[in-house]
């Protein structure tokens, strides 16, 4: 149980880590133009997912079971952004390759469970996040997968989708106390 709790804490502190690794594996295992397009559309998905999640948080302003963040808009409960992005990636990835989507299902479930187990979200917030993520992921995959973006735009989005997680992780690692505090509970 302690290992599972540590995994949940790791998900809380570095939520993008497994997806960042998968993106890197994908880049090195695919044709460069296909990989560039996938990562560019992935950036659009993540941007739309976070934007829609923040909008719902702002509109609902529901309190979390346990305060976790000090930034006002993300301090609200509904929807769980961790869940929105992780579950949405399953439906988004379906348009790239269904076998990758199937492989991501357990990751999405673990993310959902982590938010409730750590007490940072209610079940409602996790379910709303999962539904929103599935919808945004499906729409992004369905509508944008077949659209060809100009190469400079794709390159910019690839740089953003790969550098943003590194920057966010750096900021969180600087604040390593959060992981230590979570693990000590």
Image (spheres, helix red, strand yellow):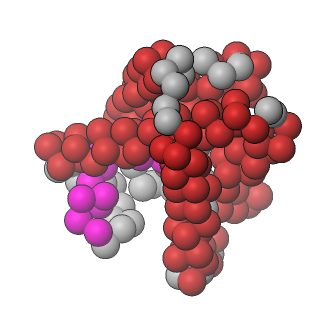
Regarding residue 148, the answer to whether it shows in the image is: yes
Q: Is residue 184 above or below residue 156?
A: below
Is the N terminus in the top left, top right, bottom left or bottom right quadrant? bottom right
Q: Is residue 83 magenta?
A: yes
Q: Is residue 178 magenta?
A: no
Q: Residue furthest left?
A: 59
Q: Residue at x 73, y 26 (%)?
A: 100
Q: Quadrant of residue 174?
A: bottom right
Regarding residue 182, the answer to whether it shows in the image is: no
Is the C terminus in the top left, top right, bottom left or bottom right quadrant? bottom right
Q: Residue at x 52, y 67 (%)?
A: 168
Q: Quadrant of residue 170?
A: bottom right
Q: Position of residue 162 (x, y in %)?
A: 61, 55
Q: Residue at x 70, y 44 (%)?
A: 23
Question: Which region of the structure is painted magenta?
Answer: 71-85
Q: Nearer the viewer, residue 2 or 174?
A: 174
Q: Is residue 100 left or right of residue 165?
A: right
Q: Nearer the viewer, residue 9 or 162?
A: 162
Q: Is residue 10 above or below residue 101?
A: below
- Magenta stretch, main secondary structure, is helix
Q: Is residue 102 left or right of residue 80?
A: right
Q: Residue at x 40, y 45 (%)?
A: 47
Q: Position of residue 87 (x, y in %)?
A: 53, 32
Q: Is residue 56 left or right of residue 80?
A: left
Q: Nearer the viewer, residue 37 or 112?
A: 37
Q: Residue furthest right?
A: 29
Q: Position of residue 142 (x, y in %)?
A: 48, 16
């Amino acid at each position: 149980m302690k290992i599972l709790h540590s995994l949940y804490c790791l998900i809380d502190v570095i939520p993008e880590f497994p997806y960042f690794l998968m993106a890197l594996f994908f880049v090195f295992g695919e044709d460069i133009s296909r990989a560039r397009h996938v990562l560019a559309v992935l950036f659009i998905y993540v941007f739309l997912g976070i934007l829609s999640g923040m909008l719902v948080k702002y509109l609902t302003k529901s309190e979390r079971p346990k305060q976790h963040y000090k930034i006002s808009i993300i301090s609200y409960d509904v929807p769980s952004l961790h869940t929105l992005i992780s579950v949405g990636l399953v439906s988004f990835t379906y348009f790239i390759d269904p076998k990758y989507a199937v492989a991501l299902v357990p990751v999405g479930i673990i993310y959902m469970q982590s938010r409730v187990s750590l007490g940072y979200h209610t079940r409602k917030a996790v379910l709303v996040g999962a539904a929103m993520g599935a919808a945004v992921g499906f729409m992004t995959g369905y509508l944008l997968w077949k659209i060809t973006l100009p190469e400079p735009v794709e390159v910019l989005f690839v740089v953003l989708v790969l550098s943003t997680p590194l920057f966010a992780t750096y900021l969180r690692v600087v604040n390593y106390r959060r992981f230590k505090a979570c693990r000590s509970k």
